[in-house]
Image (cartoon, helix red, strand yellow):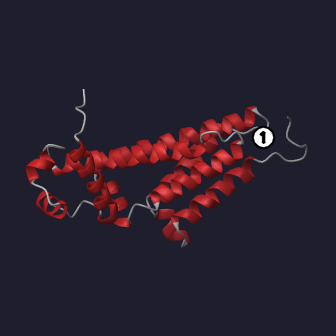
Amino acid sequence: MTRALTQRQAELLTRLEALFLTEGFGHLTLDDIAGRLHCSKSTLYALAGSKEQLAVRVVGRYFKGAAERIEKRIVGLADVRKRIGSYLAGAAEELSKASAAFIADVSDFPPTRATYERNARAAAERIKAFIQDGVQTHVFREVHAALFAEMAGLLIESIQTGVLTKRAGVSDAEAFTALGELLLDGLQRTGASPKE
């Protein structure tokens, strides 16, 4: 069972997340972190037993918070097209908070990369559910929802790692907007108007 955080620990994690998102964490020592946050190393050890465990905790916290904020954006959106667009816009907004150094450090450290990959898989599952809903309600044409979702998941991962945005010379937000357009245009029913 996880102990509840004290208010001071919660505030410290918030500041630590902001530091990592801005600068990454690979180059920082525990001494660096303690100095930057004006706390003792023992205070950091109360949060995690090592710098690596601290990184895992902070990265997990970031992705969990991002997922919760994205889900809040889509609550009450009945139109599946708007749900997909808002979900991807939320992902772009959340990712814009992370520096290239943070994304590189997350990718380079296997335990944080695993968290990152779980997040990308969860996003693909959400998109799959949206697609299935759109197909069942005749908003979208009949498609292989799992295949579309996996392709979207690979594109999301490519955006998150910076590979796609670097190759295309676009921002994360532009890439997520294009992904939304690609999905929605590719799923659009042609010919007859959608059934009610």
The residue lying at 13 percent from left, 46 percent from top is: 45
Coordinates of residue 163 in the picture (x, y in percent): 47, 63
Which residue has dot 1 on it?
Answer: 139
- The residue at the far right in this view is 192
**Nearer to the camera, 95 or 3:** 3
Task: Judge whether residue 146 can be spotted in this image.
Answer: no
Q: Position of residue 183 (x, y in %)?
A: 67, 51
- Considering every residue shown, the one lying at the far bottom of the view is 169
| Residue 58 falls left or right of residue 94 | left
Q: The N terminus appears in which quarter of the rendering?
A: top left
Q: Give coordinates of residue 173: x percent, y percent.
A: 55, 63
Left or right: 46 in relation to 79: left
Residue 145: in sight, yes or no? yes
> Residue 43 vs residue 11: left or right?
left
Q: How many marks?
A: 1
Q: Where 134 sits versus 177, above or below?
A: above
x 56%, y 70%: residue: 168
The C terminus is located in which quarter?
top right
Q: Position of residue 123 (x, y in %)?
A: 52, 44
Quarter-of-image position of residue 130: top right
Task: Tell me which amino acid carries mark 1.
Answer: Val
